Image: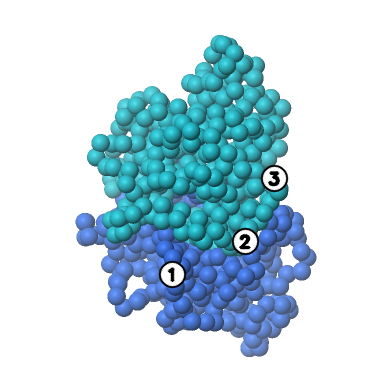
Chain colours: A blue, B cyan
Amino acid sequence: MPELRKDPIIGRWVIISTGRGKRPSNFTHKREDVLKGGFCPFCPNNEDKTPPEVLAYRNDGSKPNTSGWSVRVVPNKFPALQIEGYLHREGVGIFDKMSGIGAHEVIIESPEHNESLATLPIKQVENVLWAFRDRIMDLKKDTRFRYILIFKNQGFEAGATLEHPHSQLIALPIIPSLVAEEMKGAKEYYEYKERCIFCDIVRQETTDRSRVVAENNEFVTLSPYAPRFPFETWILPKMHDASFEDIQKQNMENLARILSESLKRMSRVLNDPPYNFIIHNSPLKDGKTTYEDYYHWHIEIMPKLTHVAGFEAGSGFYINPTPPEEAAKYLKEAEI
Amino acid sequence: MPELRKDPIIGRWVIISTGRGKRPSNFTHKREDVLKGGFCPFCPNNEDKTPPEVLAYRNDGSKPNTSGWSVRVVPNKFPALQIEGYLHREGVGIFDKMSGIGAHEVIIESPEHNESLATLPIKQVENVLWAFRDRIMDLKKDTRFRYILIFKNQGFEAGATLEHPHSQLIALPIIPSLVAEEMKGAKEYYEYKERCIFCDIVRQETTDRSRVVAENNEFVTLSPYAPRFPFETWILPKMHDASFEDIQKQNMENLARILSESLKRMSRVLNDPPYNFIIHNSPLKDGKTTYEDYYHWHIEIMPKLTHVAGFEAGSGFYINPTPPEEAAKYLKEAEI
């Protein structure tokens, strides 16, 4: 069973796959090995090659685990965490660990192997977002979980191991360290200013305009003021909202529109780069803490253009060769 | 001039290269473009192709900026920060910035193009470590600086742009975010336990042994308990010591020995992988804070085996497929 282990100095939890650890010789796989297998378990008619679906949108009355779906969610065949078991916490001398309980699911975004979120119709992007929301609503009933992380790895260099368009979801018994830091920073700002820092950012950026990439009635896409990565963008709801899953039905279409537009602009300017996005959402409610006032969910999109090396990861110090104002200008002016 | 900009939510400073920002088409360089240039500015007799040296170890009475050196330190020709200027702090609405003042130097580790820190004689590794120390002693006189970051990118995938063995140094007017977090965590532990957490880790690990990779009288190399990366190792002084530059002369040889051994073991087990190391050192003294009691300098070595993607960078959440106990066993048992 995998373990969650805590770095004793900075308190960051890490998943350690115990039991079937990766041996030194397993790290040599190449782009070709991974992406050009020929067979795709996510394509229609191969439904029996994935674990049974936990959700599928079907308009044609087709049966579960057969073709006919537009979006399909399945457990990850090689999960980083295990859904069954008791959440057991334990000390190991001065160290702390926890059983690796969690859910790891794959959201198959389309039956079409060669599409991507940037090329799919808006309606289909909206369906993917609804699938994210429906899975959150279901998984938050499980009181073992504190956080649901939704992310996408697109392209080999960004960590994808299959080409078919998909995103992933990991439900965790802990809060990821960067989200915890954002929570803390946003809370301190709120206590000092009595305002949400993300709302203040949206207000300043939509007035200043130099870092705005795209905008509609409910959402704005920005190059953030101090981005770690060149051409990094954030999509924020303009109105204060702590939790993605609370989104109003009529706003989902505009979220799909701006996500699609932002990905299209990035693809155009950077020639279809590998990228990641992550939904930074509130932790699940534990009855003790309320985040509603000071946290503000958003999506962070990071194209993978440079070798982010251990230097950055190991120091927390980033050198970004492209000012966000220039990145925003390129993205904004791209013809899509 | 470059700028230091602060993320308003979590307080992380980032260098933004303004002025000559990297355009979208500049991100497409390949391994071949970078490493196989033919001409090497770090090789002997090409001393005039680098900025004038700030330090060189010469035993033959040779003149500065000529051949005859064993270790040579020069300013980086394309520095991330600028040494000249006044350290100016400024608000931009709710945002904060600082002029990009700093030093960025290259430590050329040997005249031999095809050597590496893992293959150089111990004496030469020791010279490299003395060069780190001498540069820290010189740069800490500059009161604009708060931190001196010493690191190595080896191999294209780890961010190296030249093959010739070299490390780098960046002097900064801020403390890198991960070091600041370590400081904070170590301080909290010290206040609670009245002991250094790193000393406690050394004590527990040298008793338990399952994560010890190498050891001598003064230093120990460990696979840390909760590593983010497979085969990550840390070298720690066994005796409490806050600052690398305070190292006793007679200990430097043992540091060179264990660094060399740790790199050799990693090279052997992982087939000469790209890697980074970073010296996690105390901040420079500012007259207000003392770190002596609770901080404990160390070196973190991270082979680059997986695509650490935006997912990890964007969530702070890491999945490590190799338990540190297994990594330590492979490294410890390697024949070197």
Inter-mark Cα distance, 1 to 2:
20 Å
Which mark, residue B326? 2
Q: Quadrant of the N terminus of chain B?
A: top left
Q: Amino acid at mark 3?
A: Ile
Which mark, residue B336? 3
- Which residue in the protein does label 1 denote? A91
Label 1 neighbour load within 10 Å: few <14, some 14-19, many 20+ = few
Inter-mark Cα distance, 2 to 3:
18 Å
- On the question of residue B213 being in view, the answer is yes
Q: Are marks 1 and 3 in contact (CB under 8 Å)?
A: no
- Is residue A2 found left or right of B243 in the rendered image? right
Q: Secondary structure at mark 1?
A: strand
Where is residue A67, by image quadrant? Answer: bottom right
Label 3 neighbour load within 10 Å: few <14, some 14-19, many 20+ = few
Q: Residue at x 66, y 56 (%)?
A: B330
Q: Residue at x 37, y 47 (%)?
A: B295
Where B156 sits versus B101, above or below? below
Q: Give residue A264's position: percent from left, percent from top.
A: 56, 56
Q: Secondary structure at mark 3?
A: loop
Q: Are marks 1 and 2 in contact (CB under 8 Å)?
A: no
Q: Residue at x 55, y 28 (%)?
A: B127
| Image mark count | 3
- On the question of residue B99 being in view, the answer is no
- Is residue B171 found left or right of A161 in the rendered image? left
